[in-house]
Amino acid sequence: MRILITGICGFVGSTVARTLHAAGHQVTGFDSFIRPGSETNRAPLEQLGIKVLTADLRDAAAMEALPAADFVVDAAANPSVLAGVDGRTSSRELVDHNLTGTINILEYCKAHRAGFILLSTSRVYSIAPLAALPVEAHEYAFRLPSSASRLPGVSPAGLTEDFATLAPISLYGATKLASEAMALEYGETFGFPVFINRCGVLAGAGQFGRADQGIFAYWINAWRRKRPLKYLGFGGHGHQVRDCLHPRDLVPVLEKQFTAPKLTAADRIANFSGGVASAMSLKQLSNWCAARFGPHPVVADGTPRPFDIPWIVLDHAKASPLWAWQPATPTTAILEEIAAHAELNPGWLELSAPR
């Protein structure tokens, strides 16, 4: 099948591209190469026979000139919850990247009758109820008490697709939620298949991690390089928890979606996550790093960070029977993969997260 991947030289896009190519698909992609480090993925992808184009999804004319495909996997985004408010990018730039760019790709799908898969995010869920979750500290990590499963959109396995999506969710989350709505409407209006895959925290070797995005990769690389690290907010204890999923674990469901029959709108949105079994706090990640690389001090700083939340783990119980899917890579294997990459690429932080 002919697959077009947006943001193909990013961590997620390049991982999905390599895996789909190995499965026999004809993979083409494009990238604007705005993200530091993304240019390093171009030559390795091209050496595999994957066609990589230079194009900016904000440029409607450039999208119209792309070669025809059967399905688009949208892996391009400015993925930080601080985007648009951190001084690195303006709010207008964020909207242009994450929403206008999506609409341009949807126009491409309309023209070519191509299916569309949006790799969305757990950050479409509302910050206020997430911040209000009754977390308790246990073994260096926040966890939810069993009584929390009585809350709307919360199960013993995490947040379900029914969890609130009302503002505030951050400008980043709002652009992704709006992209979801536009994608579903385009699909219904113009008759092409659309799937919304809400992903938990994606992680693995070669991720361009920063303190505000790609935290597993950033923390491991910074720990090994003895860079300053801080536990921000929540008392400065590092108890905040995130789930963890390798993007290659998404490929089996992508291949099923390429040939899936028409589903109801509700079934076209699903969470994909490593789940509770994958979840880890910063303090637990530090303990893993200390065992792997040796001790390194982490400063406690209780100063709250905008849009931060104490705990977010997605429940993928809907996706499991719908797509016969389970995450395949345990968190420990993901962390070891990142660590091995860090040892082979000691200058990775200078490349991917310049000071």
Image: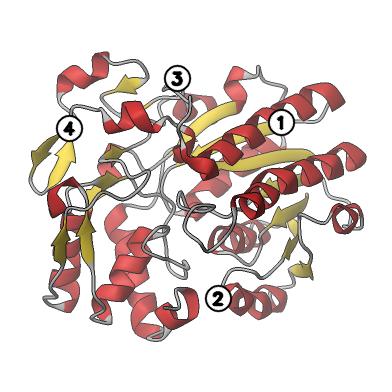
User: Which of the numbered marks, if any, corresponds to residue 37?
Assistant: 2
Residue 324 seen from this side: no
Return the disc, 2 or 1, that comes first in the chain's sequence. 2
Q: Is residue 225 left or right of residue 21?
A: left
Looking at the rendered structure, the kind of residue marked 2 is Gly
Disc 4 residue crowd, few under 14, some 14–19, many 20+, Cα 10 Å: some
The x, y position of residue 64, in whole percent, is 91, 52
Write down the residue under mark 3: 162
Which comes sooner in the sequence, label 4 or label 1?
4
- Labelled pair 1, 3 in contact (Cβ < 8 Å): no
Give the residue pinned by disc 1. Answer: 182
Which of the 4 image quarters holds residue 334?
Answer: bottom left
Q: CA distance from mark 1 to mark 3?
A: 19 Å
Query: What amino acid type should be assigned to the residue bearing mark 3?
Result: Asp
Q: Find disc 4 in the rendering and name its residue.
A: 135
Q: Are marks 4 and 3 in contact (CB under 8 Å)?
A: no
**Residue 230 drawn at (x, y percent):** 22, 64
Q: Residue shown at 33%/74% (left/top)?
A: 221
Whether pointer 4 and pointer 1 mark residues with C-beta atoms closer than 8 Å, the reply is no
Q: CA distance from mark 4 to mark 3?
A: 20 Å
Give the CA separation, mark 4 to mark 1. Answer: 34 Å
Question: Of helix, strand and loop, which one carries label 4?
Answer: loop
